[in-house]
Amino acid sequence: MHRIDSPGNADNLFRDRNPEAGIPGTIVWSKWLNAVQEEIAGLLAAREVDLDEEDNNQLASLFSLAAFLPVQNNGVGPLLRADGDGSQLTGIESSQLSVVRDGAIGDGVANDTAACQSTLDKAPGVVLFPAPGVYMVDRLFPKSNTTVVIEPGAMVKFRPQAPTSHDWGGVFSVFGTELEPKENVFIIGGGVVDGSKGDHDFSDPESSELNVECIDIEWAINCHVVAVTCINAEGDGIDFDHATDCTATRTRSVDCDGWGIHFSNGCRRCRGVLAVAVRCGVAHNRGGFDTHQGGSDQAEDCGYVGCTTEDCRRGWLLGGPRSWINGGSDLGGGVSTNCIRITGDRCSVNAFIGRGSTLAGISITGNLNAVSGCNLRAESEAVAITGNNNTVTGNVLERITAGDLLTDIGTGNIDANNIKQND
């Protein structure tokens, strides 16, 4: 596959024809279209999916549970496959570990912490939280080489009576150490993790406003959250800290006071894929998705593919070096300040759609960043640059009110081949 290189391209990006300005549109060759077609068809064929001209959701279905699970589940148990939209699992046999068989009640009242932890302690293997059921717990600690399956219709909920402290962690706390990181932990299945925000009194005088995450993964390698909905967290929906090669795929974070997904201190090569964040960060000036900034322990080489934010305090923050966004959208609403704020260096944003931020669509204070192929609409500038040597090319920029569409008070920045409306 290759980027478009036919006549009329703008730095290998498509460009609309503008007769008034004498700018030709991009010519699309059959060679390029065939390359795209075969790339997509080949991906489906590799997963043994037959092409169906009546089904326009095949590629989206592919990016579901089955696409991101290991071929064999940690060396034990059956192969897990996803059906339909990825929320239903087949292949989990009755012989797998179940929290109910170890005494969990799942009635939304009983304290199921001991029973659930007892099941997790029997791992490695598959640990099932069956539906229907609301499992009230304190913290749960999965071991390495464990797949936690929260079935659709099941909820794992933080108990209001649970003890809390300054560094409380998550309802699921995947905690390793620098010398012994946790490895190969999967939390999957289409169910819900509820942080029960507002139900606890943080009596620790050192406590901050952000304590309880739904899922907290620290000092970990190759750990993944797939098709889980995280709601009502005092902190982040999903927090990765000193995590390497970890992902959050097809997750939803709703009404969390921190970030929907947070790639925090020391994360390396982590990514969010097709994730959604709704009404996150409103209480504490966080937002949808971020990569950690500041100091020598920043997140590096982390990013997001095809993710969406809506009604969040902020859309996205790229703070760590070489952070990236490839596709995705900020649908605005709420009190969103920026669709994207870039404070890190050498970050990239490509093919992003931003709508309705109250300040700049994209604010760039870092250096050597690149924004291309985006469609940005904001109440203030579509792009505001205060950093240096950044490149903004091939974008559609629109401002809701009169004023500058792109402001640049840095040095060495490039503004080229952008289509500007309401200029």
Image (tube, helix red, strand yellow):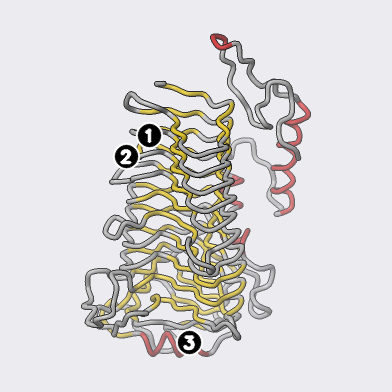
Q: Residue at x 55, y 39 (%)?
A: 371
Q: CA distance from mark 1 to mark 3?
A: 50 Å
Examine the image and state in which quarter residue 4 appears. Answer: top right
Q: Secondary structure at mark 3?
A: helix
Residue 294 location (% of width, % of height):
47, 63
Element class at badge 2 = loop
One can see residue 84 in this view: no
Q: Quadrant of residue 16?
A: top right
Instruction: Using the image as rendered, state which of residue 215 and residue 115 is in the foreground.
Output: 215
The tag earlier along the polypeptide, 1 or 2, is 2
The outermost residue toward the front is 411
According to the image, label 3 marks what residue? 119
Does 111 sit left or right of 120 as displayed?
A: left
User: Along the horizontal axis of the image, is 154 left or right of 34?
Assistant: left
Instruction: Tell me the crowding category of disc 2: few under 14, some 14 to 19, or many 20 or more residues within 10 angstroms, Cα based.
Output: many
Residues at circles 1 and 2 in contact by the CB criterion of under 8 Å = yes
Label 1: element kind: strand
Residue appearing at x 43%, y 38% in the figure: 384
For the question of whether residue 366 can be seen, the reply is yes
Q: Quadrant of residue 407?
A: top left
Mark 3 vs mark 2: in front = 2
Disc 1 vs disc 3: which is toward the camera?
A: 1
Residue at which label 2 appears: 358
The earlier-in-sequence mark between 1 and 3 is: 3
Q: Position of residue 276 (x, y in %)?
A: 44, 53
Q: Which residue is mark 1?
A: 378
Mark 3 residue type: Thr
Question: Mark 1, residues whose alpha carbon is within 10 Å: few (<14), some, or many (≥20)?
Answer: many
Up the image or down, 233 lies above or below 173; here it is above
Whole-number angstrom distance, CA of label 3 to CA of label 2: 48 Å
Which residue extends farthest right?
A: 31
Q: Quadrant of the C terminus?
A: top left
